[in-house]
Image (tube, rainbow, N blue to C red):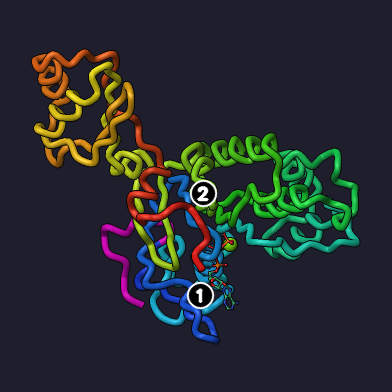
Amino acid sequence: MEELSAVDSEAVIATRGLTKRFRGGQLAVDGLELRVPAGSVFGFLGPNGSGKTTTIRMLLGLIEPTSGTATLLGRPMPGAARSVLPQVGALIEGPALYGFLSGRDNLIRYDSADPAADPRTRRARVEAALDRVGLTAAGSKKAKAYSLGMKQRLGLASALLQPRKLLVLDEPTNGLDPQGMREIRSLVRELAADGTTVFLSSHLLDEIEQVCTHAAVMARGRLVVQGPVAELAADARGRLAVTTPDPADAARVLKELGVTDLTVTEARVTGELPQGDVDLADLNAALVRADVRVRSFGVERASLEDAFVALTGEGFDVAG
Ligand SMILES: Nc1ncnc2c1ncn2[C@@H]1O[C@H](COP(=O)(O)OP(=O)(O)OP(=O)(O)O)[C@@H](O)[C@H]1O
Ligand SMILES: [Mg+2]
C-alpha cells in the first residue's frame, strides 16, 4: 500500500479511484476521489441510488471494492480493519438488532462483544448512550416493538458506546420525525465539538446545509463536487434580481452590461451575472443613468440545492 501524500495527512477518509461494480454489471460507485478533513462534519449527499451506502460499505470494509483504494484514519481498508474499526463508530442502513431483547440489552450485548470494553463500567456506558439518543424511557422496551426512528436511535447509541475519532452515519435521520431530526443534528454538532469527525450521508440537502462544514455530492455513482459547504453554495452564482416598474428598460440595460439568461416579468427582472469581476454598484449606477427606477436590487443567495442543480443540470430526483 502506498504512503499517503503530505496533503492527505489530515484526511480522515481518503479514497483513490474507488469503484464498485456489482455482479450483474451495475456500476454503483465509479472512480471516487473522496477526501474528508479531520474535524469536519462531512455531508455525503446524493439522491436515492447514487452510491452512498455502497461507498460506506467499502469504507468500513464490509464489501470489497472492484478497484481503487480507501484509507480510514490514514490506514488502508479493508487491510487495517482490525486496528482501525475500534476507533470508528458506524451506523449503516438497517442497524442489526435483536428484536427479542430490549434496547438496553441490545446495547449491553453490543458492548460485551467489544474486547476493549471494561465490563465493570458497561452499565454506565449503556445508560449514557441511551441518554444521548433520548431512549432512556424506552430502554426496557423490546427492540422489535421500536419504531423505525427508535431503531435508528438505538443504532446510533451503539456507535456512541465508546469515544470515537470518526463516526460514519448512513442516513442517521432516516425515519425520524422533525423533532428527532433536530435532536440528531444537535447531537452531531456536540460530537463534532468534542473533536470527532462525523461523516454522514443524506439525501436531504437542507439537512446537510444545517449541520455540515463540508460536503460531497454524488450522482449516479460519481462524485460531482466536494468542498466546504459555504464554497459549494457560493459556486452556484446567485442570480441578480431587480424590482422595477420599468422592467423592459432594465432588461435592455442589463443585457448591454453582459447579464445573461434574463427573465422579465411585470415588475421584476432577473438574470445571470456576467463572468469575471462585476461590481454590482456599477450595474445599479447604469440602471439609474438610464432612468430605470429601481425599487430593489440584489443578488439572491444561492443554496446548496441551486449548486446541485447547477452542477448536475438536473433536479434532485432518483436516477433510473
Ligand atoms: N448488493 C447489490 N447488488 C446489486 N446492485 C446493488 C447492490 N447494492 C446496491 N446496488 C445498486 O447500486 C446503486 C447504488 O446503491 P446505494 O445503495 O449505494 O445507493 P444510495 O445512494 O445509498 O441510495 P439511498 O439514498 O436510496 O440509500 C443502486 O443502483 C443500487 O440498485
Ligand atoms: Mg443508502
Decide: is 77 above or below 97. below
- Rendering coords of residue 313 (x, y %): 35, 55
- Magenta residues span 1-13
Q: Quadrant of the N terminus?
A: bottom left
Q: Is residue 122 left or right of residue 270?
A: right
Q: Is mark 1 within 8 Å of ligand 1?
A: no
Which residue bears the numbered disc 2?
Answer: 198
284 vs 270: above or below: above
Across and down, in percent, residue 80 comes to 50, 72
Q: Residue at x 42, y 75 (%)?
A: 19
In the rendered image, residue 2 lying in the magenta stretch gets the answer yes
Residue labelled with disc 1 = 78
Q: Amino acid at mark 1?
A: Pro
Relative depth, front residue between 178 and 264: 264
Sequence-earlier tag: 2 or 1: 1
In this rendering, position of residue 88 left or right of residue 116: left
Could you classify mark 2 by the number of other residues whose Cα lies within 10 Å: few (under 14), some (14-19), or many (20 or more)? many
Q: Nearer the viewer, mark 2 or mark 1?
A: 2
Q: Along the horizontal axis of the image, is 25 left or right of 150? A: left
The dot on residue 134 is none
Which element type, helix, strand or loop, lies under badge 1?
loop
Ligand 1 picture quarter:
bottom right
Q: Position of residue 300 (x, y in %)?
A: 33, 29
Residue lying furthest bottom:
24
Q: Position of residue 111 (x, y in %)?
A: 74, 58
Whether residue 84 appears in this view of the structure is no
Q: Nearer the viewer, residue 167 or 249?
A: 249
On screen, 161 above or below 30? above
